[in-house]
Image: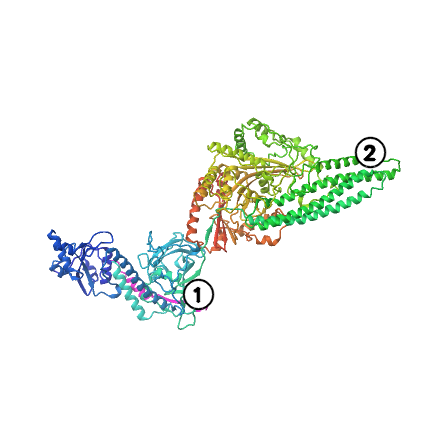
């Protein structure tokens, strides 16, 4: 080789060989066998000059003593030559380095002079005279390696910018686009190498670093993104066939002008005009013409469709075709190895050049001439083409032949054509959605404050009307009494007693009306002036006042009834005397009218004696038990309520769990006395009923296992008892006649006001048709709090952490806490040292998590009854709370606000406040036919579930609580709809004969506080998943139940239509999977990066958890909040396991 003047370079890196082949036009061969016979001169490359040059290695040698940036010392030539005890080879090397200096020597001359020593000089091969457009080589010297690397990086970036500007300018020129003259470059860092590209500010103010093609992004000195971070783009590509997604979406990263990138011309040729291109879906047999390709980035979407034109494009000019073919041939030959000749492709490109034109959607016409793309446009990076399409919002069309200056991005439709094919590029602006999942559900105190004000206004009006009725009625009865003074059959002292009683009632009515109006005005002023700080008593006062008015007016009616009884007897006596014309002075013994008169007078004296001890017109005074109830026999017929057809009968299931919880309570309370002293209860509306008469009273809970089992056995329906109850209801129905001397109480007799008040005197109304009101009353009762206290003590002993019990803040008898200027916020529980409305304390978080993970069952069954004015039982209620302590911990964790908000309503009391007012809700979208209720403040949804669902949920409840503890306290992402309580509710109304037993689950309202435009119930299937199909199948059933579902139950009787329209409720119904595809046109719904990551992680966690507990049939509820551009999501209907019935249903489908 030396004799033939051939230089052999060994150990050349592959990327250097590719550069040499590109510069010289040579080929890269893998074998030398038969090279000339196969390829001939094509294998050889050419350059004008080839030589070797030598440089001094400045990383090792320097004229003066220097320190490298890495701390490594550099050899000083002067110091080495000045030393005497230096080895000869080191001195020779120092002399050679001094001789070389900073000059560049020819390689052969450096060898002849002996300066090309190893460790002293660096030799390079220089190829000179190559085409300039193919590239060049630059040598950087004068600093250490680290500094030169930074300079090299900046220099390469500048070269890249210059090269890109050259190609992009050609692309814009051929598109007949320009930058407006008024465009000004803002005084800020320019991140893009393209013209007038503005990335804008990150969404939601987030400071994010764009993807730059590496896993570890480079950081600048300031830590902010630089132009180096914007030399790549992330796009999502989706292949569509009509409105069906053909392949899963792919996220692609393109680094500009790299191996990950392709040229614009290559993309058009291979992905648009290649009819032999196969779809990635193996089941899809359609061609490119039947597909559309969409690229999504940030808030933009580029849709590419290929169409077949009726006539081919006109032939390209000769000059354009020749230039394009020569450039393509030179590029392909220089960059590809020998053996892969593309002569056929070159001929195809020569015969089928690519042209471009633009159609304006604003002008409705083609606004640019047909132009065949040149060499520079062909080489333009496809990644930069995407960047210009997405971010260049300033460029406008500027064709010399058409007067159009519309936006290049939004108004223009770009076309590329080749032969009979045309590729259409359209851009549309989209808004990526965020994902909202409710992490907490605090009570809306402003809503309840406004509701309290509304209720107080209604009470004020209704009470005024009621007091006017009493005034008129008292005046009427007084005139009747005065008319009897002329009769000799009646004693004047009796009439005087009746008149004095009527006058006393009239004065009490006037005083009560004045007092109540003043109190309502005072409470309303305090409620409005407090602002965000709302005290608990303000929410209680409306039902306090309603119950007070009921008991007060009931006492007046009782006294009016006694006076009316006496007056009626007197009238009968007067009529009898006038008819008989006898000499009787007074009533005779044995006469019925005389007996009625004596009975009436006796009732008046007794009522005076009872009510004279109390100031009944004072709203803060507890009225005594109404007279007449003590002498009445109260029947506690439990057998009539326990109907086997209407109660749950799980021998080893639910009832056994309740009994097991009671046994644990019995064992934990062995030190408590067996018999409790029964105190006379003088609370408002209470009845003197012995505790022994209640089958589920506290004394009954302290019985042993034998007594419990016997009690369960005794609760059987006997034929005699059933017949007796039916006959009693039949003969008593319609037999009650209204007393003409009593006044109708109107709305004040609703809500069963005779029931015992709860803890702290709270009054909860009960509506038989609304199960949440029964739950609220049970949770606020003394019985429930007592059992919860037992469970808390027992858990504390088991855990080794004895905690003091909850202090009883119930007011003493004769007091009702009302809002006043001296009211203070309720103090937190002694066992929780932090704010009871938040869970920000470490100790509190641990305590809540411990209670949530408690494995022992804590079911509480509470039975209570309502009575009429005569002490007869009218209705019996039963409420069983399952996993009471665990759900209490869930509510403490989920319903508490994120940040402390002062002295607001306690979490549990806020929960009771929400449940106390609900209405029937006709939810659409489901096929189960379950009934729903929704609380008035929209916080909770109450769903009636089947017995099977209840039993299955109770079985997997420990796993559910463990999963929620990970979500609340360990940051596990989840979108499960939180269930905050499971109950079994039953009632037996002895007046109407109606009885019911149902199971309900209280869960969060996923759309609470959001304005939802559309709602979708998604299961991931299209079989029968269209809302119109579901509605057509159930149209008849919906029409029959529409009138019943339209009834709204709330505290007030009426509500204006305007208020209903303002509530954030979806009025369009629930849509299904097929409707969701129509809404999105088959494309994936765009999400921002953070929302997508959290949503996917949540779905992965939730589906894994549900599969572990054998739950497969569930849905994800998606609400579209267009105002905030967020998807409100939650997984629902996950209480049914994949049992044999579900398996048979799947096989049937």
Identify the magenta region. Answer: 338-365
Q: Position of residue 504 (x, y in %)?
A: 74, 42
Q: Position of residue 18 (x, y in %)?
A: 24, 58
The numbered disc on residue 411 is: 1
| Residue closer to the observer: 975 or 788 | 788
The quarter of the picture where residue 6 lies is: bottom left
**The magenta stretch spans residue 1057:** no
What quarter of the picture does the N terminus occupy? bottom left
Q: Position of residue 453 (x, y in %)?
A: 61, 49
**The magenta stretch spans residue 350:** yes
**1015 left or right, relative to 1091:** right
Labels 1 and 2: the sequence-earlier one: 1
Mark 2 crowd level (few <14, some 14–19, many ≥20, 10 Å Cα): few
The quarter of the picture where residue 287 lies is: bottom left
**339 left or right, relative to 427:** left
Q: Secondary structure at mark 2?
A: loop
Q: Which residue is mark 2?
A: 591
CA–CA distance between discs 1 and 2?
A: 104 Å
| Residue closer to the observer: 471 or 163 | 471
Q: Quick check: 492 above or below 138?
A: above
- Judged from this view, the residue extending furthest toward the top is 706
The numbered disc on residue 489 is: none
Q: Secondary structure at mark 1?
A: loop
The colour scheme used here is rainbow
The quarter of the picture where residue 561 lies is: top right
Q: Position of residue 1002 (x, y in %)?
A: 54, 43
**547 left or right, relative to 50:** right
Mark 1 crowd level (few <14, some 14–19, many ≥20, 10 Å Cα): many
- Judged from this view, the residue extending furthest toward the front is 822
Viewer-side label of 1, 2: 2
- Judged from this view, the residue extending furthest toward the bottom is 401
Res 1047 seen here: no
């Amino acid at each position: 080789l030396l004799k033939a003047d051939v230089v052999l370079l060994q150990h050349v890196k592959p990327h250097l060989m590719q550069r040499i082949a590109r510069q010289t036009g040579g080929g890269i061969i893998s074998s030398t066998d038969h090279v000339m016979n196969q390829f001939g001169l094509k294998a050889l490359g050419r350059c004008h000059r080839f030589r070797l040059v030598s440089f001094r290695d400045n990383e090792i040698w320097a004229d003066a003593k220097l320190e490298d940036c890495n701390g490594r010392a550099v050899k000083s030539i002067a110091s080495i030559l000045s030393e005497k005890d230096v080895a000869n080879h080191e001195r020779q090397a120092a002399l050679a380095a001094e001789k070389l200096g900073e000059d560049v020597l020819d390689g052969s001359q450096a060898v002849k002079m002996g300066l090309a020593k190893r460790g002293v000089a660096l030799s390079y091969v220089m190829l000179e005279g190559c085409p300039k457009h193919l590239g060049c080589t630059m040598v950087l010297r004068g600093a250490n390696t680290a500094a030169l690397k930074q300079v090299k990086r900046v220099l390469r970036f500048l070269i890249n910018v210059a090269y890109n500007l050259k190609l992009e300018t050609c692309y814009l020129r051929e598109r007949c686009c320009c930058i407006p003259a008024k465009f000004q470059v803002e005084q800020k860092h320019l991140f893009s190498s393209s013209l007038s590209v503005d990335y804008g500010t990150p969404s939601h103010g987030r400071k994010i670093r764009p993807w730059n093609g590496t896993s570890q992004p480079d950081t600048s000195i300031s830590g902010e993104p630089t132009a180096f971070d914007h030399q790549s783009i992330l796009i999502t590509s989706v292949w569509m066939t009509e409105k069906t997604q053909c392949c899963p979406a792919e996220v692609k990263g393109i680094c500009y002008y790299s191996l990950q990138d392709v040229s614009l011309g290559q993309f058009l040729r291979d992905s648009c005009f290649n009819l032999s291109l196969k779809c990635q879906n193996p089941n899809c047999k359609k061609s490119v013409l039947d597909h559309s390709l969409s690229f999504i980035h940030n808030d933009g979407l580029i849709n590419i469709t290929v169409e077949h034109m009726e006539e081919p494009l006109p032939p390209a000019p000769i000059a354009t075709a020749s230039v394009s073919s020569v450039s393509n041939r030179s590029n392909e030959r220089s960059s590809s190895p020998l053996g892969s000749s593309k002569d056929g492709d070159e001929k195809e490109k020569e015969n089928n050049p690519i042209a471009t034109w633009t159609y304006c959607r604003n002008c409705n016409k083609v606004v640019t001439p047909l132009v065949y793309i040149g060499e520079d446009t062909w080489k333009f990076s496809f990644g930069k083409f995407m960047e210009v399409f997405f971010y260049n919002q300033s460029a406008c069309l500027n064709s010399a032949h058409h007067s159009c200056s519309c936006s290049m991005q939004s108004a223009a439709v770009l076309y590329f054509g080749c032969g009979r094919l045309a590729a259409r590029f359209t851009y549309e602006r989209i808004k990526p959605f965020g994902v909202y999942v409710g992490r907490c559900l605090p009570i809306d105190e402003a809503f309840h404050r406004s509701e309290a004000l509304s209720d107080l206004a209604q009470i004020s009006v209704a009470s005024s009307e009621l007091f006017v009725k009493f005034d008129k009625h008292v005046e009427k009865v007084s005139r009747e009494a005065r008319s009897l003074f002329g009769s000799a059959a009646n004693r004047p002292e009796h009439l005087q007693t009746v008149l004095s009683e009527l006058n006393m009632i009239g004065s009490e009515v006037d005083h009560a009306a004045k007092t109540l109006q003043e109190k309502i005005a005072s409470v309303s002023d305090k409620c409005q002036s407090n602002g965000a700080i709302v005290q608990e008593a303000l929410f209680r006062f409306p039902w306090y006042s309603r119950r007070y008015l009921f008991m007060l007016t009931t006492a007046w009616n009782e006294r009016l009834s006694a006076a009316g009884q006496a007056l009626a007897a007197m009238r009968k006596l007067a009529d009898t005397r006038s008819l008989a014309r006898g000499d009787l002075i007074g009533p005779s013994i044995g006469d019925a009218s005389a007996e009625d008169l004596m009975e009436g007078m006796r009732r008046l004296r007794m009522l005076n004696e009872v009510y004279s001890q109390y100031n009944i017109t004072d709203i803060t005074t507890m009225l005594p038990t109404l007279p007449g109830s003590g002498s009445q026999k109260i029947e506690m017929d439990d057998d009539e309520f326990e109907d086997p057809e209407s109660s749950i009968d799980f021998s080893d299931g639910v009832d056994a769990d309740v009994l097991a919880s009671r046994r644990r309570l019995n064992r934990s309370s062995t030190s408590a006395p067996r018999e409790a002293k029964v105190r006379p209860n003088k609370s408002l509306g209470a009845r003197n009923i012995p505790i022994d008469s209640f089958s589920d009273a506290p004394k009954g809970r302290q019985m042993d296992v034998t007594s419990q089992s016997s009690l369960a056995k005794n609760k059987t329906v006997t034929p005699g008892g059933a017949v007796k109850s039916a006959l009693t209801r039949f003969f008593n129905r319609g037999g009650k006649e209204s007393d003409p001397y009593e006044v109708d109480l109107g709305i004040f007799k609703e809500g069963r006001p005779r029931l015992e008040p709860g803890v702290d005197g709270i009054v909860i109304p009960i509506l038989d048709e609304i199960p949440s009101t029964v739950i609220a009353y049970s949770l606020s009762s003394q019985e429930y709090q007592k059992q919860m206290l037992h469970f808390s003590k027992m858990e504390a002993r088991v855990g080794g952490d004895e905690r003091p019990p909850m202090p009883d803040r119930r007011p003493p008898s004769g007091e009702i806490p009302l809002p006043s200027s001296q009211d203070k916020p309720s103090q937190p529980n002694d066992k929780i040292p932090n704010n009871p409305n938040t869970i920000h304390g470490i100790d509190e978080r641990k305590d809540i998590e411990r209670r949530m993970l408690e494995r022992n069952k804590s079911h509480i069954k509470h039975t209570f009854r309502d009575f009429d004015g005569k002490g007869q039982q009218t209705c019996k209620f039963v409420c069983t709370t399952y996993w009471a302590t665990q759900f209490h911990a869930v509510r403490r964790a989920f319903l508490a606000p994120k940040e402390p908000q002062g002295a607001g309503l306690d979490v549990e009391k806020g929960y009771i406040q929400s449940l106390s007012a609900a209405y029937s809700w006709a939810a659409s979208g489901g096929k189960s036919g379950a009934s729903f209720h929704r609380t008035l403040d929209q916080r909770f949804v109450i769903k009636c579930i089947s017995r099977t669902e209840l039993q299955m949920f109770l079985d997997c409840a420990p796993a559910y609580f463990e999963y929620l503890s990970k979500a609340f306290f360990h940051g596990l992402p989840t979108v499960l709809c939180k269930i905050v309580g499971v109950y079994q509710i039953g009632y037996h109304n002895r007046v109407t004969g109606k009885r019911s037993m149902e199971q309900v689950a209280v869960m969060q309202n996923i759309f609470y506080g959001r304005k939802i435009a559309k709602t979708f119930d998604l299961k991931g299937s299209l079989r029968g998943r269209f809302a119109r199909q579901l509605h057509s199948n159930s149209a008849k059933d919906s029409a029959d139940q529409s009138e019943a579902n339209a009834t709204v139950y709330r505290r007030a009787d009426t509500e204006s239509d305007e208020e209903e329209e303002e509530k954030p409720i979806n009025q369009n119904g629930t849509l299904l999977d097929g409707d969701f595809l129509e809404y999105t046109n088959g494309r994936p719904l765009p999400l921002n990066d953070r929302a997508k990551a959290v949503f996917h992680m949540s779905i992965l966690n939730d589906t894994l958890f549900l599969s572990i507990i054998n739950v497969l049939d569930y849905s994800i509820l998606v609400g579209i909040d267009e105002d905030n551009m967020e998807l409100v999501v939650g997984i629902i209907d996950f209480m049914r396991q994949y049992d044999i019935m579900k398996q048979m249903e799947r096989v049937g489908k």
